[in-house]
Image (cartoon, rainbow, N blue to C red):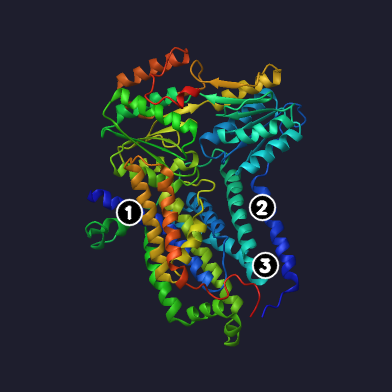
Amino acid sequence: MSRARPFSTALNIVAALALLACGHDRASQAIDSTHAGSSFKVALLTPGPISDQSWNAGAYQGLLRIRDSLGAQVSHIQTKTPADFEENFRQYGAQGYTLVIGHGSEFQDAAKRVAPEFPKTTYVTTSGATTGPNLAGLSFGFAEPSYFAGMLAASVSKTGKIGAIAGQEIPPVAESFRAYAQGARAVNPAIKIVTSYIGNWDDVSAGKEQALAQIAQGVDVIFQNADAAGLGVFQAAREHAGTYVIGSNSNQNGVAPDVTLGSVVIDLPLAFLTVAKEVKDGTFKPGLVVLGSGTRVVTLVLNPTLASKIPNTMRSRIDSLQAEMVAGKFQLPAASDSSAHAKS
Amino acid sequence: MSGGWSAFVEATVRTATPLGLAALGELVVERAGIINIGLEGVIIAGSFGALVGATHAGIAGGYAAATLCGVGVAFAFAIFAVWLRADQIITGTAVTLLGLGLAGTLYRAMYGASGAALTIPTSRALAIPILSRIPVVGAGLFDQPIVTYVFYLMTPCLWWWMYHTHAGLATRAVGESPSAAEAAGVRTNRVRLWSLLFGGAAGGLAGGTLVLAQAGTFAEGMSAGRGFIAIAIVVLGRWHPLGVGIAALVFGAASALQYVLQALGLNLPYQLFLAFPYLLTLVALAGVAGRVRAPAWLARVDEG
């Protein structure tokens, strides 16, 4: 029955090699040769594609800012699994990189394991809280601007029902959505808030479906934090007049200017540059770096195109509260369940 | 609550359309004795093709390019699987990784790292007179983009083709016993190739649907595992065109229910909702497992 073909084994090997090659290619490093030879080398690991117009795009811009402002030789890699995280951290350590940034709280465990092996490299995880002699966590004050986003959503909503959509319920998202709900209730105590999770950060169609389901339930303002999948939320709003979106992470006001009220923007380039400068000068003290209240790193940026949709009183209220926040004078009202918030 | 019902039916059909198209294509491939687990790569190639086609030649150009890209990726698979008789699982995995990697790389090369967000026009829904007025389900089923009607029509057409034409019989014969088919004068490799190319066209169209009828943009990895779900739907539909069409709708309904349940704001862990379509598929598979038989020559590389 089975006439084994002599060359089928060989072919399988070829196919397997092709597979390996492709797998490798998918996570291949993009080394920028602009400042090749510079002794200051900075690497960035992102959990998703840098074309997401959000979390990962901002980080990549930060990396380029480091290259241009500090003359660093930079490298970026997109990683998928925790095994990749560790392997790539190790690779960069072995290649003598000065600063390696893992862009997300999911990189913490891998960074903690690898950092002691390469004491000359500084490892930083964004949204991380793990620290060590050469390991720092960079955390953002996402809560306050999310609180303002909640106020904004509640003041624009005509149905009294607002939504929030994210990829997964990771700690920074949970904290942000809690503050969003709090801000909304501060404006309208009777407001209804529904939260949906897509399950991943890539599936644009599923992101759109989650938004459409919320819209069908009467939701008319959605705060989204789902990276690439969040593009589907904008699309859903574009197809339903009177529905608005608040973006996250990067300034997404230009993604869909006709439906985006504003964005909770993390100025990742500023944050990365601040850290990289200190690392380069040797003044960086590894630990928990909090860039929040008292800085301009995370802010709610309103979309000028839709300014007319936002009540004037609300706009000036948000402006003055935000000015207080930047001055370090704004304190979030204590939440009823403040367990997660207490950490930052 | 009738508005809610209609929204549920619409979401069901929207979710089922790309899955159903890809699964019907894969069905023909599997009935010819080949398993293309590179379907995920075919779909993402279709999505990327749709983006490129639509930016240059409108929505119709987008669908055409999506289909062509799907065919192209399937042809690459065919070279290894049909002529060179490489292991189909390994080749398919390579094709999936190649498709995902290539689409992402080309996307960044052509549109830059910042991407081309939400610039693609999407195809409008086309209401079918009379049918779309049926209470409760009419608007959901019959007020959809054209590609949905392609899915509706493809299901019975494939059934007729598979069981009432010589070509359909030949395809099934190749999947069951290639040596017998060969003896009867069927050119087995030609049948396998055409099946794969059809599967590629359908998978590419599925990828195009994601971009042109749903997202209005391209994102790396936006196929999000639909190729593998479509392969499961083929099994769930018991390798029968009508079964596959229904299975796609059942999976779509389970997903739509998940969306609605989350939007209702029930206070349950969201992971439960997300797992629901997959749990349902598992239960349904377990239920039919005893009575269902795959094509005898599926994924075998040796000639009988």
Percent position of residue A337, x then y:
39, 26
Look at the numbered disc 1 and give the secondary structure of its residue: helix
User: Which residue in the structure is indicated by mark 2?
Assistant: A22
**Chain designation of label 2:** A
| Disc 1: CA contacts within 10 A as few (<14), some (14-19) or many (>=20) | many
Q: Is residue B185 visible?
A: yes
Up-down relation of residue B97 to residue A339 (above or below): below
Percent position of residue A34, x then y:
71, 32
Percent position of residue B108, x then y:
59, 43
Give the number of the disc on residue A44: none
**Chain designation of label 3:** B
Q: Is residue A35 visible?
A: no
- Distance from disc 1 to disc 3, alpha carbons, whole Å, reads 42 Å
| Disc 3: CA contacts within 10 A as few (<14), some (14-19) or many (>=20) | many
Q: Quadrant of residue A309?
A: top left
Up-down relation of residue A95 to residue B294 (above or below): above
- Asked whether disc 1 touches disc 2, contact meaning CB atoms under 8 Å apart, the reply is no
Q: Amino acid at mark 3?
A: Ala
User: Which residue in the structure is indicated by mark 1?
Assistant: B10
Q: Amino acid at mark 1?
A: Glu
**Chain designation of label 1:** B
Do the residues at discs 2 and 3 belong to one chain?
no
User: What residue is drawn where x is 50% and y is 62%?
Assistant: B231
Among the two numbered marks 1 and 3 on one chain, the one whose residue lies closer to the N terminus: 1
Residue furthest bottom in the image: B184
User: Which residue in the structure is indicated by mark 3?
Assistant: B86
Q: Quadrant of residue A48?
A: top right
Q: Amino acid at mark 2?
A: Cys
- Distance from disc 1 to disc 2, alpha carbons, whole Å, reads 38 Å
User: What residue is drawn where x is 45% and y is 64%?
Assistant: B286
- Relative to residue B123, is residue B34 drawn left or right? right
